Image (cartoon, rainbow, N blue to C red):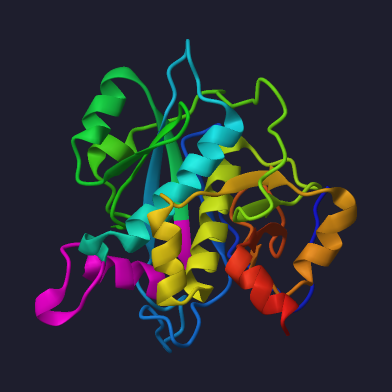
Amino acid sequence: MRASCPGTIRSAKNHRFGGWQTGGVSTEDTQNPPSDSPFHDDSPRDEARQYVLPLVVHIEKAEPPARTDALETAARAVLVMLSDERSLGEGDDEGEWARVMRDWQDARIRKVVRRARGAEWRKASALPGITVTGKEAEVRVFPPVPLDGWPKELAKLQVSGTDLDDPAEPGAPEAIAPVLWLNPDLGMSAGKAMAQAGHGAQLAWWELTEPERAAWRETGFALAVRTADPAAWHGLTRSGLPVVRDAGFTEIAPGSCTVVADHPALRARVAGG
């Protein structure tokens, strides 16, 4: 089932950038950073040079991670990259990744998830980036790269018919935990869902104040990813919380709502009017 978000929907370009089954997931939200974001830029996002944030999930055939663990680890990896000192600063205080992080966020926000095992994972791990671990999942996030400028160690990574499952239903999230709610009407592959969870985490990050960001960082970016109750989904998308709207490059229709970012600080702000 393909569900669309309320409000304005951008039209997507008529092309795809692979898929979870054929070598990666390319997906993007269609919202701009808030006007007070350090990465905000008034230039048209489609006219800027396009970058992508690569994420590589470690999947060994014999012991793949659980799906929810991988989704949560990918979302945390995005937050770790956004908050890393190498991604921050300007001028003389600029981190080594700060310029490319700004360029990436001034264009469309693309994330590509690929899979590696064995020697492929070791080679990918040798490139500049950050490995984030979950209960069992490992996800390495790299500084953004141009769409046409992938390192060869990452460009050749593929997914050949592998998806992820949860051995048991994940429990209910804690009432005070940030939750990334997935659209219950969309059957997204694991890679697609990982990228979308990363989008949701990023939209929440943009909306938080610096003290709220610092508090979240101190928890190790604790969060949960869960599929929303179908009866609650409609209200979530209209609650005032950040909503990811997919551009439709892979798997789902342009304008589909994929994730609602339900952070306690934002929840309180919405409730307070």
Q: Residue at x 55, y 41 (%)?
A: 71
Q: Quadrant of residue 66?
A: top right
Residue at image position (74%, 76%) is 271
Among all residues in the image, which is located at the extreme right? 231
Viewer-nearest residue: 106 or 81? 81
- Image quarter where the C terminus lies is bottom right
Side of 1 relative to 174 (left or right): right
Total number of numbered labels?
0
Residue 18 shows in the view? no
Q: Residue lying furthest left in this view?
A: 92
Q: Is residue 25 above or below residue 104?
A: above
Task: Pick whichever, 216 or 248, lies toward us.
Answer: 216
Asked whether 3 or 14 is in front, the reply is: 3
State the image coordinates of residue 252 (x, y, percent, origin top left).
Answer: 69, 51
Q: Quadrant of residue 187?
A: top right
**Image location (x, y in percent) of residue 241:** 68, 70
Is residue 242 in view? Answer: yes
Residue 149 drawn in magenta: no
Residues shaded magenta? 88-110
Where is 84 relative to 33, above or below? Answer: above
Question: Which of the 4 image quadrants contains residue 254?
Answer: bottom right
Is 169 rendered above or below residue 2?
above
Q: Residue at x 54, y 66 (%)?
A: 204
Which one is nearer the viewer's eye here, 149 or 101? 101
Q: Is residue 12 left or right of residue 128?
A: right
Q: Position of residue 238 (x, y in %)?
A: 79, 72
In the image, residue 34 lies at what x, y percent? 50, 82
State yes or no: residue 96 in magenta: yes
